[in-house]
């Protein structure tokens, strides 16, 4: 059995998860990555997507809208901009955020718009997987 | 000596004031608990953020092309003071103590020939600063409709600040807020947020791999760290406000109690004096016959 490591998921307003896990799948800015115990120390930014923590008692899914993750051999801390559990409750909030993001993307232009469109699409894809 | 009717009215009015202050104290106590919980819930994020930013900043600082939010604009001429106060009064010295610290700083900076601009958050601070520093006010953030401060409120404030910063309207930004120490003690605290202050003992985290790159992450993190600091200040302020109000109202309730006691004694004395006087009049009248 794989070793366990400490995992914390915090948003500015509260702590969403904290505990021992086997692995965490992180939607990093440059592609998904999975962090396990003894991972090389890394700091990476996040894109909107699904974050999965695999604890011995089962996996938990969250949707994050951005932020960054600090991975060290001892554990992983994810500092999400906004994070919601991937369930019906979280979905309502996420739909709202998606609309907001789309509206903002509409209002902007140039490379900024491309970036926002991409973020919105990432989020939309993440939301689809909940259902 | 005031007549009995007046005294009675007076006692009645102080009694109802006491009821109000007592109620306000209890409301503040309940709100304080909630505000404290919110402040505690936000702490892990803020601490982690500060750790990472300090580590990054220490390794990037001094190198060329460091972001402006970290290295500064190269000048220290224009200072932006962000004065965070409450939207309501009746909370003891809470608002005035922040304003006092901010005003002192503003005067000191002006004495050094610097330009001072003031952004107020919360109505009370604005009212107090308008009197003598009205020319320096450059903006105001109204939070009177906000029941519970959220990260979005902080994001709105920081957005405003970044817009000004990008337009080159100031070089250094400092927030003023009350740090919550306990119910009876709130410490007005200035904290410089732009350019970021790196503690001298911050260790350089050379151990980390950065994805995408150190600079790109810093670029993304610095604004977020500013917002987080503002958010922390808002939360601390909210807890401090309720704490200050609670102790102010506790005092007021006690004072009202003392006042009622004094007035009651005076009332009883006057009443007794009137009775004695009537008796003397009757007896001396009877004796005269």
Image: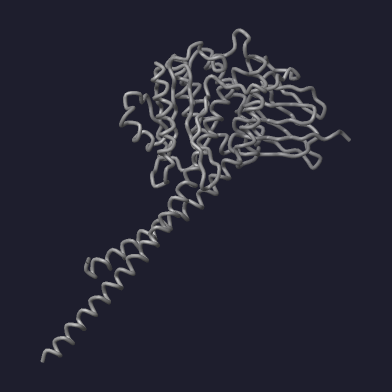
Q: Nearer the viewer, residue B227 or A85?
A: B227
Q: Residue B122 in the image: state x and y as whole percent.
A: 41, 36
Q: Quadrant of residue A115?
A: top right
Image quarter of residue A11: top right
Q: Quadrant of the N terminus of chain B?
A: bottom left
Q: Is residue B286 above or below residue B19?
A: below
Residue lying at the far right of the rendered structure: A1
In the rendered image, residue A33, in percent from the top left (x then y), is placed at 74, 24
Q: Residue at x 49, y 39 (%)?
A: B237
Q: Where in the figure is residue B112, as x and y percent of width and height?
A: 41, 17
Q: Nearer the viewer, residue B275 or B96?
A: B275
Q: How many marks?
A: 0
Q: Would you say B283 lies left or right of B83 here?
A: left
Indicate the quadrant containing the C terminus of chain B: top left, top right, bottom left or bottom right. Answer: bottom left
Quarter residue B144 falls in: top left
The residue most toward the bottom is B289
Residue sitting nearer the eye, B251 or A75 = B251
Q: Residue at x 59, y 32 (%)?
A: A82
* Nearer to me, B224 or B2: B2
């Amino acid at each position: 059995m794989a070793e366990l490591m400490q995992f914390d998921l915090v948003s500015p307003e509260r702590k969403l998860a904290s505990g021992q896990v086997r692995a965490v799948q992180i939607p990093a800015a440059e592609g998904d990555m999975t962090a396990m115990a003894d991972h090389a120390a890394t700091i990476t930014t996040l894109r909107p997507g699904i974050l999965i923590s695999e604890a011995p008692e089962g996996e938990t899914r969250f949707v994050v809208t951005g932020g960054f993750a600090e991975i060290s051999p001892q554990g992983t801390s994810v500092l999400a901009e906004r994070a919601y559990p991937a369930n019906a409750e979280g979905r309502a909030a996420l739909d709202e955020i998606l609309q907001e993001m789309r509206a903002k993307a509409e209002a902007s232009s140039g490379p900024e718009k491309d970036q926002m469109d991409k973020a919105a699409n990432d989020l939309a894809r993440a939301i689809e997987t909940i259902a | 000596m005031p007549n009995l009717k007046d005294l009675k009215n007076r006692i009645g009015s102080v009694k109802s004031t006491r009821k109000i202050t007592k109620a306000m104290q209890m409301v503040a106590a309940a709100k304080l608990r909630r505000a404290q919980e919110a402040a505690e819930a936000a702490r892990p994020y803020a601490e982690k953020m500060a750790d990472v930013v300090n580590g990054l900043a220490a390794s990037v600082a001094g190198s060329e092309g460091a972001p402006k939010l970290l290295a500064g604009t190269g000048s220290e001429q224009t200072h932006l003071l962000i004065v965070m106060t409450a939207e309501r009064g009746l909370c003891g010295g809470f608002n005035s103590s922040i304003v006092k610290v901010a005003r002192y700083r503003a005067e000191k900076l002006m004495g050094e020939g610097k330009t001072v601009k003031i952004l107020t958050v919360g109505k009370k601070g604005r009212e107090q600063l308008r009197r003598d520093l009205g020319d320096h006010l450059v903006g105001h953030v109204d939070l009177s409709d906000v029941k519970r401060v959220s990260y979005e409120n902080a994001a709105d404030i920081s957005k405003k600040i970044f817009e000004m910063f990008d337009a080159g309207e100031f070089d250094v930004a400092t927030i003023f807020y009350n740090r919550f120490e306990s119910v009876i003690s709130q410490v007005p605290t200035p904290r410089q947020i732009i350019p970021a202050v790196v503690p001298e003992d911050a260790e350089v985290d050379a151990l980390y791999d950065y994805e995408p790159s150190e600079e790109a992450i810093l670029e993304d993190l610095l604004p977020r760290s500013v917002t987080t600091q503002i958010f922390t200040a808002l939360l601390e302020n909210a807890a401090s406000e309720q704490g200050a109000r609670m102790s102010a109202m506790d005092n007021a309730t006690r004072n009202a109690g003392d006042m009622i006691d004094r007035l009651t004694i005076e009332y009883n004395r006057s009443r007794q004096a009137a009775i004695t006087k009537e008796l003397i009049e009757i007896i001396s009248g009877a004796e005269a016959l």
